[in-house]
Amino acid sequence: MSLVDAALREAVIDVARQAGAAIMQVYADGFDVEHKDDLSPLTSADLAAHHVIVHALAQLTPDLPVLSEESAQLPWDARRQWQDYWLVDPLDGTREFIKRNGEFSVNIALIRDGVPVFGVVQAPVGDVVWHAMRGDGAWRREGGREDAILTRRPPALPLRVAASRSHRDARTGELLARMGEIELVAQGSSLKFCRIAEGTLDVYPRLGPTSEWDTAAGQCVLEAAGGVLLAADTGEPFHYNRRPRLLNGDFIALGDPSLPWRDWLAAP
């Protein structure tokens, strides 16, 4: 399969928007909250968006498997054979959805040999879309307007640092203190990657578990805009579907790759 052509790009963007519309319908009508085995929340919006995306991608690219958060039980022996596949989070930021703060997204990424090569992040509230092709730039689309986006390099001071609304711990607080004077901006879901990509934020450190579907689409957008998402232990970009577990380790996302991130991560 070649890199995604223009027609498929538009079709997948439309799929993300359809999933966002399904989420907003549940948002308007009301919903119950269940919990998975790992105690993470699940709503009918997660499942509605999942069904929209999986069905549509099967129609668009029947030869490509789809790994969605809501179908993550696929065995490693099957997954390890995949070269190209779709990696999907139908509703990233379910906790933000439940809080009704608008900071949730639909994430769709095409993975090739472990690397996200095409990514779409859609914000259902406001219907804003960020999309990117590896090596071919990143864009923000809103209200009929589309603009190419780039990270801030070099950033102005103080650095604008994204912090999760729902996931904050003592280690993260210590890291933020080592960064010196910063402007802390609370932001939910993979929208953090997109804000860095468009130059309105500079850094997003995450010390704690995430899953592969949480980061892939946002990583693609961020890297295509000039930034990086790096594993905290190796300093290497994330790769996907390389092991049985689907959990990510600690990472830091940067708009300017030359920032002294190792100093921030190094505990005294």
Image (cartoon, rainbow, N blue to C red):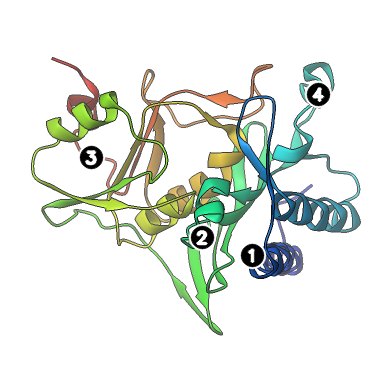
Residue under label 3: 258
Q: Quadrant of residue 122?
A: bottom right
Q: Amino acid at mark 4?
A: Gln
Q: Amino acid at mark 3?
A: Ser
Q: Quadrant of residue 149?
A: bottom left
The answer to whether one can see residue 123 in this image is yes
Q: Amino acid at mark 2?
A: Arg
* Tag 2 secondary structure: loop
For disc 2, the neighbor class at 10 Å (few under 14, some 14 to 19, many from 20) is: few
Question: CB atoms at circles 2 and 1 under 8 Å apart?
Answer: yes
For disc 3, the neighbor class at 10 Å (few under 14, some 14 to 19, many from 20) is: few
Residue under label 2: 100
- Name the residue: 73% across, 65% down: 22
- Name the residue: 37% across, 18% down: 233
Residue under label 4: 81
Q: Earlier in the sequence, mark 2 or mark 4?
A: 4
Residue under label 1: 27
Question: CB atoms at circles 3 and 2 under 8 Å apart?
Answer: no
- Name the residue: 46% across, 60% down: 101
In screen coordinates, is 202 left or right of 57? left
Give the Cα distance between marks 1 and 4: 38 Å
Image location of residue 163, percent across then percent down: 32, 44
* Tag 4 secondary structure: loop
Give the Cα distance between marks 4 and 3: 36 Å
Give the Cα distance between marks 3 and 2: 36 Å
For disc 4, the neighbor class at 10 Å (few under 14, some 14 to 19, many from 20) is: few
